[in-house]
Image (cartoon, rainbow, N blue to C red):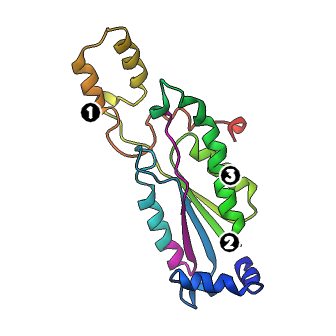
Amino acid sequence: MRSTRERNLWAQFDALQLGAGFTTEDIEAPQIMVEDVFGDSHPGSFHLNRLTEQVKYGVYQSGGVPCMYHTTDVYDGCAQGHDGMNIVLASREAICDMVKVHASAVPWDGMVLSSSCDKSIPAHLKAIARMNIPSIFLPGGSMRPGPYQTTSLAAGEISLKQRRGQVAEAEIRNYKLTGCPSVGACTFLGGENFDERGI
């Protein structure tokens, strides 16, 4: 195992892991990096820590030891209509780079990544492609549609109508209450359908 080979060259590795609560049996097991983009600022990432908690159980059951990282993402929907939109695409590279930092700083035997949205998914897939370790990608899924199959895509039309004074307050309120009814990526899956140019 890669982790064993490197650990045998540097005694502090074992000391640090034991200091973090590992047992002596744990430090002999395959070391698996588990990373998500959990954050509670938007529904696309809000649930991912619960998914990766289940991943950790699976790693333990398979004889490995999981180690958790979070590099949270930002959300296009919250960046719309102001200068925040200028940073959203750059966030994809930042997430990819952080995963590469985490995956390179420790000699992992494997890696599991989980994300949902249209910048974090390609960021994770790019990181997997660039790192030479066995990897699994766990998608976080999409949110449920709202009434009459409404999705968060309706926000653009409602926002334009609102600026022109062409929408009733009740319609805006109804959209706000039902447009994003659960966690997960936006149900219209716009950005998630990227091609090889997006990787």
Q: CA distance from mark 3 to mark 1?
A: 36 Å
Indicate the secondary structure of the residue bearing disc 2: loop
Answer above or below: position of 152 versus 119.
above
Label at residue 177: 1
Label 1 Cα crowd, 10 Å radius (few <14 / some 14-19 / many 20+): few
The residue labelled by disc 2 is 108
- Rendered location of residue 154, percent (x, y): 39, 24
Which amino acid type corresponds to the residue marked 3 in the rendered image?
Answer: Asp
Label 2 Cα crowd, 10 Å radius (few <14 / some 14-19 / many 20+): many
- Rendered location of residue 168, percent (x, y): 25, 14
Label 3 Cα crowd, 10 Å radius (few <14 / some 14-19 / many 20+): some
Bounds of the magenta segment = 58-76
Answer above or below: position of 167 versus 153.
above
Label at residue 86: none
Q: Are marks 1 and 2 in contact (CB under 8 Å)?
A: no
Which amino acid type corresponds to the residue marked 2 in the rendered image?
Answer: Trp
Mark 3 or mark 2, earlier in chain: 3
In magenta segment, residue 124: no
Indicate the secondary structure of the residue bearing disc 3: helix
- Rendered location of residue 83, percent (x, y): 54, 27
Q: CA distance from mark 3 to mark 2?
A: 16 Å
The residue labelled by disc 3 is 97
> In the figure, is residue 38 to the left or right of 132?
left
Which residue is drawn at the image coordinates 29% and 13% (left, top)?
167
Nearer to us of marks 3 and 1 is 3
In magenta segment, residue 63: yes
Mark 3 or mark 1, earlier in chain: 3
Which residue is drawn at the image coordinates 68% and 84% (left, top)?
12
- Image quadrant assignment for residue 177: top left
Mark 1 or mark 2, earlier in chain: 2
